[in-house]
Image (tube, rainbow, N blue to C red):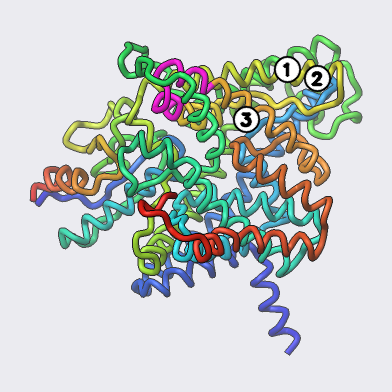
Amino acid sequence: MKDIRKIMCACGSGLGSSLLVEMNIQDVLAKLGIDGVEVTHSTTSDVRPGAADLFVVGRDLADFIKEVDDDQKVVLTNIVDKDELEQKLREKLDL
Amino acid sequence: MEAVLNFFVNILSTPAILVGLLTLLGLVLLKKPVEDVVSGTIKTIVGFLVLNAGSAFLQSDSLNAFGEVFNYAFNMQGVVPNNEAVVSMALTDFGQASALIMCLGMILNIVLARFSRLHYIFLTGHHTLYMACMLAVVLSIGGLEGWTLYIAGGCILGLIMALSPAYCQPTFRKIAKTDSIALGHFGGIGYAFAGWVGRFFKGGKSTEDINFPKRLIFLRDTTVAISITMMVFFVLVTGVAVGRGILAEDPANFVYLNTLLNVGTETETNWFVWAITCGMSFAGGVYIILSGVRLVVGELVPAFKGIATKLVPGAVPAIDCPVCFPYAPNAVIIGFLVSFVGGIVGLVILGGINASLMPVALILPGVVPHFFCGATAGVFGNAEGGLKGCIAGAFAHGLLITFLPAICMPVFTALGFTSATFSDADFSWIGILFGNLAQITPGMPLLIICIACFCLPILYNALVPKKQADAE
């Protein structure tokens, strides 16, 4: 498993949808039995390489985090779909 | 004894600590481990204090000056529609009431989801906070205070939290192609309206069938969007004021313009630089407020969601508006642009009314409400009537969120909020309705009306037989 300690979700003002994705990530991590990963949410202004080990955004915001390497980001087609989230997180975590 | 009592009264009347206690309660109910409870509670309290700091910065470095310069330049009241600005100001006087109304409203939202046919759990926490604050302000006009205020506000908040997703659902269902999620955003009536307008253009080509440049999407970043609009507003307004000779005025005539008029500054201030800095300070203030709000709702919402899903089988989560953006990226941009044009047209009409009929507040088109709400309205219009529906719906929405705040403005002006107001449509219609009710039927009747409004959907569910398909 890859060493991911901090995941940051982002959206336009960092209040609503990013918090929803954060809650979904917490659920998925719990389901996968992964402990000790810090999940936060914020605005896309706060996304920069190094601020977290993995960034998660919706497809419509992919252009906002272009500076982040592909292997450090997850772009969701449907931000409320937990199955998609789980599958993409598994890839990043090398599970 | 009195010292102990004072201590508790003090805790309950310090909004930051009160909100912290509510979070504490939620986290304990969810049986979270001690360290999570401690960190969650502390973050919430700090968030509230950060929010206050942002508010002070926003007002002292930008908003107050804007009001004065605008007044000098145009002899009118110019209003920036920005939820964060007005909420942060109102929280200084209504913090305690807002916190308790928010808590009661969330509980009553769960009650409605359980016992009425509105099964929606409203998860957009910052809007819950803003609406709680607005209700505290407008209901206090009706002479309600203490527990009567909290109960009346909580009832209306619980109701609108379940009702707003309900009136968006007929169209939102066509966008998301499911009934298992809903839209939870207090621009709701504007989206329902845009969807209704879009229905007149049924069967046209969808926005997603055309090629449309996506570059404007950068305005989705709140900081960038607010900076650009407020810089433009400040430069225009200050430019006019300078043209009319504000720089030669006696600084004693103004309260907030010391920097512009070189009082106590070492170098001479250039008005253009001053205007640009003020515009960016507005964005800076909102950035600080948003960080505070993020800390406050970041702990509260998961607790609320956890409790609600345990208590309400079949609860439908109602989610913030960007949830519908990926379904129609072109409609997002077109909706924003057209809604913004609607806002400018609305502003011109307001100016005309002000000059010829009666004094009204000028509601300036803010990029943030036109972006987030306009984009959502565009997606709604597109879902009902394709490209034409998107354009017509978003334009109608742009007019709506200019006129509604203007109608609502007297309610707030009476309380001293002169330079900022709520932008999104639900805040306005609730504000207009209950602000006026509060003036017509103050006191106990107002409380009874609020409780009755809340009970209606539950009574309806109990008394009216369900149709086969369990219609919404």
Residue B235 placement, left or right of A59: right
Answer whether residue B200 is magenta in the image. no
Question: Does the image show residue B292?
Answer: no
SS of the residue at dot 3? helix
Name the residue: 69% across, 14% down: B236
* Type of amino acid at the residue the image marks with label 1: Ile
Q: Residue B353 carries which label?
A: 2
Q: Residue B224: horizontal and vertical position, in percent? A: 49, 26
The numbered mark at residue B401 is 3
Q: In the image, what residue occupies the spot 35% across and 50% down?
A: A40
Whether residue B391 is in magenta: the answer is yes
Q: In this view, does B30 lie above or below B292?
A: below
Same-subunit check for callouts 1 and 2: yes
Instruction: Tell me where the magenta segment starts and ends, as one range.
Output: B378-394
**Vertical side of B274 occupied by B182: above or below:** below
- CB atoms of marks 1 and 2 within 8 Å: yes
Classify residue B348 by image quadrant: top right
Q: How far apart are marks 3 and 2 (CA)?
A: 17 Å
> Of residues B132 and B42, which is closer to you in this image?
B132
